[in-house]
Amino acid sequence: MDFRSSVSLLVVLFALLSSSPQYQILAEDVSSVVEASLKVSTPFSTALGTLQNQINYTFKSVGLLRRAMTHASFSEENNKALSILGASVIETSVSLQSLIKDVDISAKDLNVKIADVSNMERSCNADGTRLGLQKIVRVSRKTNVTSPAVVCGAFRAILGAIAVDAGSSDEAGWVFWKVHSGIGRAATM
Ligand SMILES: *[C@@H]1O[C@H](CO)[C@@H](O)[C@H](O)[C@H]1NC(C)=O
Ligand SMILES: *[C@@H]1O[C@H](CO)[C@@H](O)[C@H](O)[C@H]1NC(C)=O
């Protein structure tokens, strides 16, 4: 089968699957294949490219970033587990930097710092909003995409996705600090 006919087959397959709700998740996957084989830029894939520039991290597996930018209300393949890893990347990173700066820091002060930086409404939501994630993350029509839970979950999931992509949490920790300290604003991109 030549390239043209395999692409047409994928398009037909995609059309068939999209019309049937129980195949929506599969259709999602097929849509990625069609996108990749046709090199189509959808607004979503363009946004993922811009996002990688903003955070200065290029994914080996961009599927991880797609997943990070997909809320549980949108599909079975979503960012819930990645965001758990991302939350612990933030905690590790804050603990490490605080102890490098001052090994005598009290447990109480360290816990306060961790709680500050992890706070969903104030800190985490602000970091995600700074990256413009509320304009990228895919949610169901009933879900409020600007709610702190969605934006913060997506931000944590990006960090989790970087850690999985890189096979270590170091790079994700640096991306966290860059975004948290205000580098990578959506507005300047
Ligand atoms: C982006 O990443 C590259 C490679 O890791 C590095 O050399 C460069 O300094 C980074 N740029 C910014 C703006 O952080
Ligand atoms: C969505 O969430 C934001 C932030 O919590 C809130 O300000 C806004 O009113 C909500 N929108 C709707 C339609 O509920």
Image (spheres, rainbow, N blue to C red):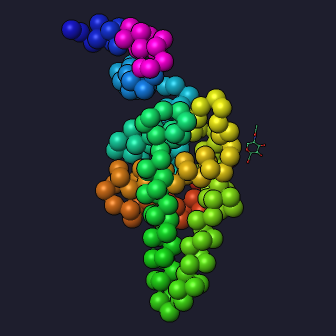
Question: What quarter of the picture does the C terminus occupy?
Answer: top right
Q: Main secondary structure of the magenta part?
A: helix
Height in image: 114 above or below 66? below
Residue shown at 63%/71% (left/top)?
116
Nearest the viewer among 93 and 148 is 148
Residue shown at 53%/65% (left/top)?
177
Q: Which residues are magenta?
A: 11-23
* Residue with the most extreme left position: 1
Height in image: 27 above or below 169? above
Residue 108: name its quadrant.
bottom right
How many labels sit on residues? Answer: 0
Residue shown at 56%/73% (left/top)?
114
Residue 92: name its quadrant.
bottom left
Q: Position of residue 35 (x, y in %)?
A: 41, 23
Residue 189, visible in the rendered structure: no
Q: Position of residue 181 (x, y in %)?
A: 61, 65
Residue 68, visible in the rendered structure: yes
Residue shown at 68%/39% (left/top)?
144
